Amino acid sequence: MRVLVLSRAPQSYSTRRLRMAAKERGHRVQVLDTLRFSLLLEQGSPEIFYRGRRVRVADAVVPRIGASISHFGTSVVRQFQQMNVFVANTANAITNARDKLRSLQILSKYDIGIAPTSFVRGRDDILPAIERVGGAPVIIKLLEGTQGVGVILAETQKVAEAIIETLQGAKQNVLIQKFVAESKGRDVRAIVVGDRVVASMRRVAQGTEFRANIHRGGKAEPIELPEDYRFAAVRAAQILGLRVAGVDLLESATGPQLIEVNSSPGLKGIETATGIDVAGAIVDYVAEQVMFPELDIREKLTVNTGYGVAEVNVVTGSALVGKAIQDAGLRAEGVVVLSLDRAGQATPNPDDAHVLAAGDRLTCFGPLAVMKDLLPARKQPRRRKYTASGAGRTDSTATG
């Protein structure tokens, strides 16, 4: 396998480890400066050049795209995708993770614990926003900060307001996030590769520092993550489209609270703390995917007009509840069940004798008109009301 590692820092620990792991496994590997590529866009024939020379076809690309070159870096990754080269993380996934607001917006519709977060621009909205996330103290974050840079703890409402106004005056977009007091100075980093956590550690801040990042002097210790933490980490990476990710979680009284997902996680801290060959796990995963590439089911199966892929939720009271798949009449209508998800456990290509239960989620392919009739009626969304101070919330049905 020929692997290209895209990195502006060939001597950094992470890049060196990826190159070493690939060589140890007999792969051919090159580290190339992301900014030295140029792209050629032609009908039916996208090409890419490095230092003016056409790049020979590679089997896989492992991108290490820093925040300062996100736009051009993701364009390079996307060009390789258009040339049907496997990339460890796609351009869209990197973009999703790089913007903290964007990633939390995507994750917020799913049943994954995230620290309550607000985003505002108007000065009059700052104090209500602080109240909505639970009041001071709060964490204030720059949208694209890394390694703990641009993360500030504001102990009081007045201090938070002053910091936010100052940053906004400097044309910086900031997030206001709930401060999880019980996890002060501690967080968990899980490295997700594919569909599993390959290594995890707890980071502990030193002295009066509240940020636990290794780059801020935090100390790391290996831990065995509980199942709910492992599930949250893998699910978050998958939702954002990341195949390789560093997922940061807080240990709250109510369970894991996700705070950030990183598309280019550093390897030095996690490998040093755990002794696990994380770089090797990444290379092994990439090699496996090159042999058995993932397919976009929707793209492959929606070639016939009127057919498509849909997710059907089996709700209480549905005619599907208690019936085996073979007796539910789906196949007779031309609907094939590709996967069944029950309580977070997916069963691909479920047996026809599988009995359906309320809460099951079916990924189906078939006539859209038939599957439309299987979907439950949409409920009116409920919205929260806030008192003038932002506290004391009630629910009411939205009225359009």
Image: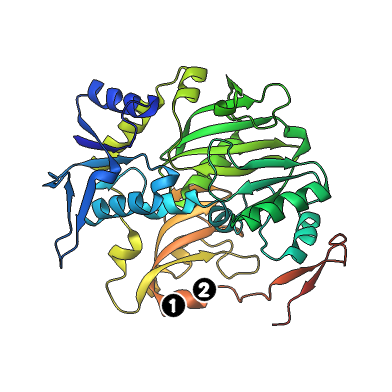
Residue 72 in the image: x percent, y percent? 33, 52
Give the camera-side residue of 82 and 325.
82
Residue at image position (53%, 39%) is 247
| Quadrant occupied by the C terminus | bottom right
Look at mark 1 in the image and give the residue it sits on. 370
What's the CA distance linking mark 1 and mark 2?
A: 7 Å
Secondary-structure class at tag 2: helix
Q: Which residue is mark 2?
A: 374
Left or right: residue 132 compared with residue 81: right
335, 212: nearer the viewer: 212
- Crowding at dot 1, Cα within 10 Å, few <14 / some 14-19 / many 20+, comes out as some
Q: Are marks 1 and 2 in contact (CB under 8 Å)?
A: yes
Side of 113 relative to 41 (left or right): right
Where 206 sits versus 48, above or below?
above
Q: Residue 224: name its quadrant.
A: top right
Q: Residues within 10 Å of mark 2 (few under 14, many from 20)?
A: some
Residue 385 vertical placement versus 351 (above, below): below
Q: Residue 398: where, in percent of width, then height?
A: 73, 77
Q: Residue 130, how many percent across, how many down?
A: 77, 54
Q: Secondary structure at mark 1?
A: helix
* Circle 2: residue type: Leu
Residue 113 visible in the current orientation: no
Q: Residue at x 77, y 66 (%)?
A: 124
Near-viewer residue (399 or 227): 399
The residue sitting at 40% across, 43% down in the picture is 243
Q: Quadrant of residue 46?
A: bottom left
Q: Is residue 289 shown left or right of residue 211?
A: left
Q: Amino acid at mark 1?
A: Val
